[in-house]
């Protein structure tokens, strides 16, 4: 190839032409505009080979008969740019004025682009050249229009990559050969957004090794960057519950032809400590000291401790979990000694009250089998005892159920679990599904022999950009000698709003929840909710008590909490009447 070439560069969807800057055009004979202006009598075009004169004449606003009253140089340069912007010319045409027999002539000298000959594409491995060539709409033999070519590249080839999810794709270089044996040939080099590395910034506390491990689960060096991979990584980071903000961007790598994904994070306040003092007619004066850290050692681990000081119910609860034991494994453990009062039908003639003590611990190990599926196995031991303080907690129960529920002792159990999760955010879900199942088997030398099965299915339907409609179905089945503290208890803040806590108790349960969530402000800090909850509980699916509620609520979302929202719900009992105000942390489902 010989001669000068027209070059262009396309980066992240924007075309930048590196063409010769427009120079000021001198007036022939040193003419300048005078008060009455200069009238153009004729227009002469020099250099046209293939284009019709109408292409030039229709593109400028100086016509034969036009009187130029403004600055002549400004008008000529402006019209030169009009012509160059058509895309048919290799350089800005030169416009000048000449005189002939007392007539003013506008002289336009142009240099056409060569006729389009074809395109040579390099760097493409995802799509064959035969699939990309038809996106260029230029017709061979016609004068090459660089503006049409730019649009074809940007809105055709590059858009195809982006629409198919290859968000890192870009144009490295394109050029049109203006002369020689390959005149009219377009040379296009594509960068398909091959990742060199994922970089993080802003993680002052969070371990860089942990973030790299999470990134490696989604994005591999040497592979093209895809929209799906970026979105899943962003979900993983938000679901850690330790970041207020996560912002991805793409930058050229120091290695030629590669890109880096840079992720800027803003860390949330993850440590919380509290001291509380209160009084209740049931438990008397009670004090608490609590501590929680959701990013322990910068590894996304959770550590919690609760100490309770009370004459009636002193105790403690310790918890530790590591969701990122490895790229695939996670575990949690807990230890507790809790004492509390349990009431039934308070304020009625048949009111009852028990003093309940539970001591035990648990350990659970899990593994992610894929992006969506995980499983776990847990071990638990708990000693349960109680003292009846008032009334008969087991009234209206048959002899077999009474005998079963009156029993105290130790439970030793193994729990198996599986889950399938496509939610976009586990704290404030907008779309996706979550299905989990668990089976608990108790025996192994303990005092109780029973089995419990739970199936929980949730589906979230986006309603516009910020609203969502969620449904949950939860089924519970208990078989064998299920003790009272292992029965299903529904009613209250996390099951049926509008009912008292634990209003429905049994070994078989069905729970249905429906909730519509919508923003109350532009930032989404305050979110409204309309809901209805329905439950059936009993000793068999054939004979079950039921409860139902409906109401309205408000969520106050604070990213720094890492819990999604503070929740306030007012629920009405649709069966027996009355209402209850419920306060909770995090969405109910």
Image: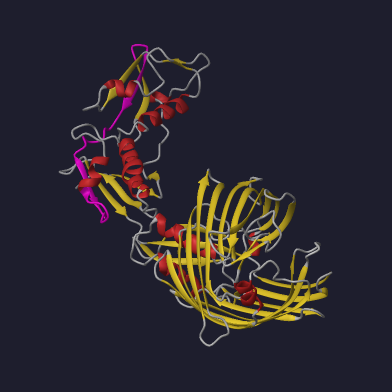
Quadrant occupied by the C terminus: bottom right
Q: Quadrant of residue 157?
A: top left
Residue at image location 32% in from the left, 55% down from the top: 191
Q: Position of residue 105 (x, y in %)?
A: 35, 17
Between residue 406 and residue 56, name the one nearer to us: 406
Which residues are drawn in magenta? 100-129
Count of numbered tags = 0
**Can residue 176 be seen from the camera position used here?**
yes
Q: Is residue 39 magenta?
A: no
Q: Position of residue 332 (x, y in %)?
A: 55, 78
Instruction: Name the residue furthest front.
Output: 399
Residue 81 vertical position relative to residue 208 in the rendered view, above or below: above
Residue at image location 36% in from the left, 45% down from the top: 159
Between residue 354 and residue 418, name the one nearer to us: 354
Between residue 350 and residue 267, name the one nearer to us: 350
Q: Quadrant of residue 51?
A: top left
Residue at image location 52% in from the left, 83% down from the top: 443
Q: Position of residue 1 (x, y in %)?
A: 19, 48
Residue at image location 39% in from the left, 67% down from the top: 370
Residue 334 horizontal side relative to residue 441, left or right: right
């Amino acid at each position: 190839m010989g001669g000068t070439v027209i070059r262009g560069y396309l980066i992240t969807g924007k075309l930048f032409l590196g063409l010769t800057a427009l120079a000021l055009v001198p007036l022939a004979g040193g003419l300048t505009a005078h008060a009455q202006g200069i009238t153009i009598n004729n227009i002469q075009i020099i250099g046209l080979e293939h284009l019709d004169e109408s292409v030039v004449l229709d593109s400028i606003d100086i016509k034969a008969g036009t009187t130029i009253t403004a600055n002549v140089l400004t008008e000529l340069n402006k019209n030169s740019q009009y012509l160059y912007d058509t895309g048919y010319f290799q350089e800005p045409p030169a416009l000048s004025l000449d005189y002939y027999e007392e007539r003013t002539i506008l002289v336009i000298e142009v240099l056409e682009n060569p006729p389009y000959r074809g395109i040579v594409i390099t760097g493409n491995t995802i799509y064959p050249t035969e699939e990309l060539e038809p996106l260029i709409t230029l017709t061979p033999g016609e004068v090459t229009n660089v503006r049409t070519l730019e649009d074809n590249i940007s809105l055709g080839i590059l858009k195809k990559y982006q629409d198919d999810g290859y968000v890192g794709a870009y144009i490295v270089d394109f050029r049109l050969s203006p002369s020689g044996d390959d005149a009219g040939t377009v040379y296009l080099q594509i960068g398909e957004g091959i990742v060199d590395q994922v970089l993080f910034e802003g993680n002052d506390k969070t371990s860089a090794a942990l973030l790299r491990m999470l990134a490696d689960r989604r994005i591999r060096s040497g592979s093209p960057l895809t929209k799906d991979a970026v979105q899943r990584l962003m979900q993983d980071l938000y679901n850690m519950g330790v970041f207020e903000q996560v912002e991805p961007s793409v930058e050229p790598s120091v290695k030629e032809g590669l890109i880096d994904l840079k992720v800027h994070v803003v860390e949330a306040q993850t440590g919380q400590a509290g001291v509380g003092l209160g009084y209740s007619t049931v438990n008397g004066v009670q004090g608490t000291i609590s501590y929680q850290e959701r990013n322990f050692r910068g590894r996304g681990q959770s550590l919690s401790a609760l100490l309770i000081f009370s004459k009636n119910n002193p105790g403690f609860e310790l918890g530790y979990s590591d969701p990122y034991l490895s790229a695939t494994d996670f575990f949690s453990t807990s230890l507790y000694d809790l004492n509390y009062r349990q009431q039934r039908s308070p304020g009625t003639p048949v009111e009852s009250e028990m003093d309940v003590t539970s001591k035990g611990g648990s350990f659970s190990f899990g593994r992610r089998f894929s992006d969506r599926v995980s499983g776990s196995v847990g071990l638990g031991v708990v000693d349960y005892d109680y003292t009846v303080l008032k009334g008969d907690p087991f009234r209206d129960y048959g002899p077999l159920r009474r005998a079963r529920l009156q029993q105290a002792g130790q439970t030793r159990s193994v729990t198996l679990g599986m889950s399938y999760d496509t939610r976009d955010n586990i704290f404030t879900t907008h779309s996706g599904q979550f299905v989990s199942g668990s089976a608990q088997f108790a025996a192994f030398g303990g005092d109780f022999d029973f089995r419990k099965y739970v199936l929980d299915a949730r589906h979230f339907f986006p309603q516009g950009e910020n609203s969502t409609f969620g449904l949950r179905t939860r089924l519970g089945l208990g078989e064998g000698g299920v003790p009272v503290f292992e029965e299903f208890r529904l009613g209250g803040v996390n099951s049926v709003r509008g009912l008292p806590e634990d209003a429905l108790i049994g070994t078989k349960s069905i729970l249905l929840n429906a909730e519509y969530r919508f923003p109350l402000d532009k930032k989404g800090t305050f979110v409204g909710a309309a809901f209805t909850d329905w439950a059936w509980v009993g000793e068999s699916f054939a004979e079950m008590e039921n409860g139902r509620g409906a109401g309205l609520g408000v969520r106050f979302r604070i990213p720094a909490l890492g819990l999604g929202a503070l929740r306030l719900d007012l629920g009405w009992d649709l069966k027996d009447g009355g209402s209850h105000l419920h306060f909770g942390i995090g969405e109910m489902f």
